[in-house]
Every structure is written in structure tokens, then in C-alpha cells.
Image (cartoon, grey):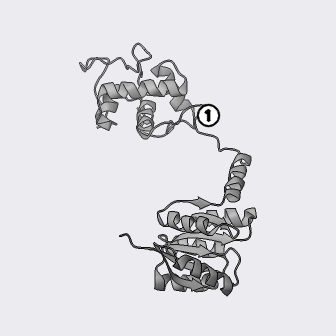
């Protein structure tokens, strides 16, 4: 049998705390371990009782719910804070969520909804009252999305970013394979993916783009060959080849001094 969810009740109205305690004490799997009338008292009780979930009122004297949740997030990050309030204003909702609350419920919710929210919060889930969720969605839609470093293009994976950085530095496919400890075939696959994501046709244009675009992945950083970028392509084919045939001939003098 799993241990019960330990709940701390934080509300400046004693009648509210008493009613919540009576309601929750009859529920299996939930244990009320403490009460507090404001945020300052709640922090002291948290140390003594080690709750799993804190049910927090938004407006309280001395220290309100948002400030309490900020302290809990820093000093007691294992405590899941749920705001239970009569207020559904944006300042309270977004302030509490930004502070670290895992949920926001209104005091007109049903007992079953509250019990379910406590259990879900104890499992690490986020719980929002339907009106709060609707307000959050509306706010997200009102806020313009931050521009991507690849406008209208797919983001690069971590490995693709590494390959792009080395291409910008003038490395051949073989040198990239050695440095990243992968096969040349895998390097070619990553180059082909980069060409597709940047909308380019060959490896030369890709290298130039990575060096010229300040927002491209590390295009201006990383070691550069003092003699200038190597010819990143032999035939400049769309398959990501770089003109090396694995023989170490004149087209591929082997790893440069920067790569050793």
C-alpha cells in the first residue's frame, strides 16, 4: 500500500481550513499534516511536517500565496503547491504559475475535483481549473511566439549543430567523423539533413551560409584554418560528400593541425 499524500492547508480563514480538513480526512490516501494562517507560518510548518502538497490561498496577510510559493519552489522544491482561491484575475493566476505553482483551482470547485487535484499534484501532474486553463491558453495566443534561429525551418538536433559547427570551421567529412567518433556515412546523413533544413542544394553553399549567418549554429565560432576555409566540397553533390575518397590523397591531406 502506497503512503498517503501529505497535505498542508494554508488559508487565513480558520473556517475554511476546518472545512477542508474535515472533507479531506475522510478520503483514502490523503493525510492533512498541518495548517497555517499565512505564508510565514506555512514555511515554518513545512519544515516541521514535510508535506507533499500545499493547498494555498492567494490572498493572505504578512506573506501572500504567490510569495509563499516562490519560497517553497526554492527552499522546498518537493512540495507541490496548488492555489485554491476565489480570485481568477490574471495577476494571481500567472503570478502563482510563474512562482512555481503546479495548479490553480477556484473555491467553487467540487470536493471530488479538489481531491482529484491533490492526488494528481502528489504524482507530479499539473492541475488547472477549466476557467484558468482557458485564461492561460488565451494569454499564450495573445503573446507572439519568439522567433526561431531558423525562421520557417526545423530546429537542429544537438548532433546536427555539432556537424554544422565543424563544417563552418572547414572540416571534411572524414575529420568530422573522427572528431565526433561517428562514421562518414553518418556524417553524410547529417549534412543531407542540414541541407534540407536550410533549404540549400550543396555543401559549399551550406559552409558559406554557416559562416555568413550570425544566427546559424556557431557559424562565427570554432577554429578556422589560417589559410581560409577548405573547399568543403568536391563535386558539391546534394548527398553531403566532400570530395574525399578515403585514400588520404591530395584532395584530403588528413586532419589539420587544428583538429589534432
- Position of the N terminus by quadrant: bottom left
What residue sits right under mark 1 in the picture? 151
Q: Position of residue 53 (x, y in %)?
A: 52, 72
Splitting the image into 4 quarters, where does residue 18 fall? bottom right
> Left or right of 126: which side holds 164?
left
The residue closer to the viewer here, 173 or 104, is: 104
Q: Position of residue 51 (x, y in %)?
A: 48, 77
For the point 69% across and 59% down, which residue is it? 132
Hey, which residue is sitting farthest top in the picture?
235
> Left or right of 254: which side holds 27?
right
Q: Position of residue 223 (x, y in %)?
A: 41, 38
Q: Is residue 26 visible?
A: yes
Q: Position of residue 174 (x, y in %)?
A: 31, 27
Helix, strand or loop at disc 1?
loop
Splitting the image into 4 quarters, where does residue 245 fall? top left
Q: For the image shown, how many numbered marks are present on the structure?
A: 1
Hey, which residue is sitting farthest front in the picture?
26
Q: Is residue 172 visible?
A: no
Q: Residues within 10 Å of mark 1 (few under 14, many from 20)?
A: few
The residue closer to the viewer here, 111 or 54, is: 111
> Left or right of 164: which side holds 58?
right
Q: Is residue 68 above or below residue 190?
A: below
For the point 63% across and 70% down, which residue is it? 83
Amino acid at each position: 500500500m502506497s503512503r498517503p499524500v501529505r497535505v498542508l492547508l494554508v488559508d487565513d480563514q480558520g473556517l475554511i481550513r476546518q472545512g477542508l480538513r474535515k472533507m479531506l480526512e475522510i478520503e483514502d490516501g490523503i493525510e492533512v499534516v498541518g495548517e497555517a494562517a499565512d505564508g510565514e507560518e506555512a514555511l515554518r510548518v513545512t519544515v516541521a511536517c514535510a508535506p507533499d502538497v500545499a493547498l494555498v490561498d492567494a490572498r493572505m496577510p504578512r506573506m501572500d500565496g504567490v510569495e509563499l510559493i516562490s519560497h517553497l519552489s526554492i527552499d522546498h522544491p518537493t512540495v507541490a503547491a496548488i492555489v485554491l482561491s476565489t480570485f481568477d484575475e490574471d495577476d494571481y493566476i500567472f503570478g502563482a504559475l510563474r512562482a512555481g505553482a503546479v495548479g490553480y483551482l477556484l473555491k467553487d470547485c467540487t470536493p471530488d475535483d479538489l481531491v482529484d487535484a491533490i492526488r494528481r499534484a502528489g504524482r507530479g501532474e499539473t492541475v488547472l481549473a477549466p476557467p484558468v486553463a482557458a485564461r492561460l491558453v488565451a494569454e499564450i495566443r495573445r503573446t507572439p511566439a519568439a522567433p526561431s534561429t531558423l525562421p520557417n525551418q526545423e530546429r537542429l538536433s544537438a548532433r546536427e549543430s555539432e556537424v554544422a559547427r565543424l563544417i563552418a570551421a572547414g572540416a571534411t567529412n572524414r575529420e568530422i567523423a573522427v572528431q565526433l567518433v561517428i562514421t562518414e556515412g553518418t556524417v553524410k546523413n547529417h549534412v543531407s539533413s542540414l541541407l534540407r533544413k536550410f533549404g540549400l542544394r550543396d555543401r559549399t553553399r551550406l559552409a558559406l551560409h554557416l559562416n555568413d549567418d550570425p544566427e546559424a549554429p556557431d557559424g562565427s565560432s570554432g577554429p578556422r584554418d589560417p589559410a581560409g576555409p577548405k573547399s568543403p566540397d568536391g563535386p558539391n553533390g546534394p548527398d553531403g560528400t566532400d570530395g574525399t575518397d578515403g585514400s588520404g590523397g591530395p584532395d584530403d591531406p588528413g586532419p589539420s593541425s587544428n583538429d589534432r
